[in-house]
Amino acid sequence: MLLKLALVGASVLLASLAARRFGHAVGGTIAGLPMIVGPIMGFVLLQETPAHASEIALATLVCLPATIVHVLGFAWCARWGRRWGVALLTANAAFLSAGAALLALRLPPPLACAAALASPALGALALPRLREPPAAVTIPRVELACRVAAAVAMAFCIVRSAGAVPAGVSGLLLAVPITGNVLPCFTLPRHGAAATVALLAGFARGLLGFASFFVALRVGLAWAPPAAAYGFAWLCALLAALAVRAIGTKTVGR
């Protein structure tokens, strides 16, 4: 519990500081990377068998398209002028509905991995088009503290609630995108719809690194020791993030 809460707070702080220095899109990309679950999976590999860790990676990948649905729900609510509370409720209702449907489908592992890798790109295409030039963002220290506190409180409530519900619901709750909930709720009222969409577009790009991490981890565990598979997973996540960032830079330049 303490480890996850600390990682949640650190992830939100790092993404917010990146947004303050480089703009909303960069902050969103960092938030979408496996900054929280990546280190947690390292501890899982120390405590569990490779087969069990591989199943956890697959279960995470199954729910990833639902996270993209969450991103789209919040972005379009922002585009239509809805307040952050309405956008938050809409996005999470869409996430839980999509996640339940994906779990019920019981997709074969190769198809689940392919869907997880494809969903960030497809989600980026479905986002509203609002121009937000990359630039530094003003985020007061008080707001930084509030962001971290909100994320930690949300993570605590999710983890505690997950232990009191059936396993399927518990898995969905643990897959709720915490940074994907907290950061847009602070961005929308202060910076507007265009900034929120830029943040969420960056978040979707970062999720490609997230998906790459878990696909590489699952593949690596099939043929390599856990330590090597874990290092390979982080390498693939970073390469995916760098590739997406390079493509995004070229697109902005045009």
Image: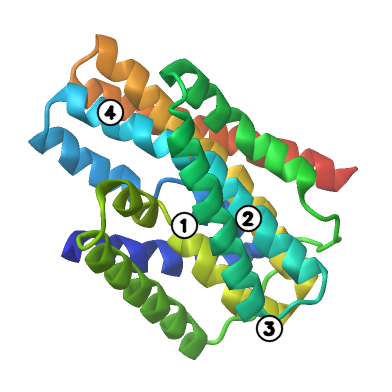
Secondary structure of residue under mark 3: helix
Circle nearer the viewer, 3 or 2: 2
Q: CB atoms at circles 1 and 4 under 8 Å apart?
A: no
> Whole-percent x and y of residue 218?
34, 22
Farthest residue in the top direction? 223
Is residue 84 toward the left or the right of residue 79 in the image?
left
User: Sequence order check: which comes first, mark 1 or mark 2?
Assistant: 2
Type of the residue with mark 4: Glu
User: Sequence order check: which comes first, mark 3 or mark 1?
Assistant: 1
Q: Residue at x 46, y 78 (%)?
A: 147
Q: Nearer the viewer, residue 12 or 48?
A: 48
User: Sequence order check: which comes first, mark 4 or mark 3?
Assistant: 4
Q: Is residue 53 above or below residue 74?
A: above
Type of the residue with mark 3: Pro
Which residue matches tag 1?
Answer: 177
The CA span between labels 4 and 3 is: 39 Å
Secondary structure of residue under mark 2: helix
Q: Is residue 156 above or below residue 228?
A: below
> Whole-percent x and y of residue 204?
62, 47
Q: Residue at x 65, y 76 (%)?
A: 86
Is residue 224 toward the left or the right of residue 95 in the image?
left
The CA span between labels 2 and 4 is: 25 Å
Secondary structure of residue under mark 1: loop
The CA span between labels 3 and 1 is: 20 Å
Packing grade of label 4 (10 A; few <14, some 14-19, many >=20) is: few
Is any part of residue 10 visible from this angle?
yes
Type of the residue with mark 1: Pro
> Whole-percent x and y of residue 93?
56, 62
The CA span between labels 1 and 4 is: 20 Å
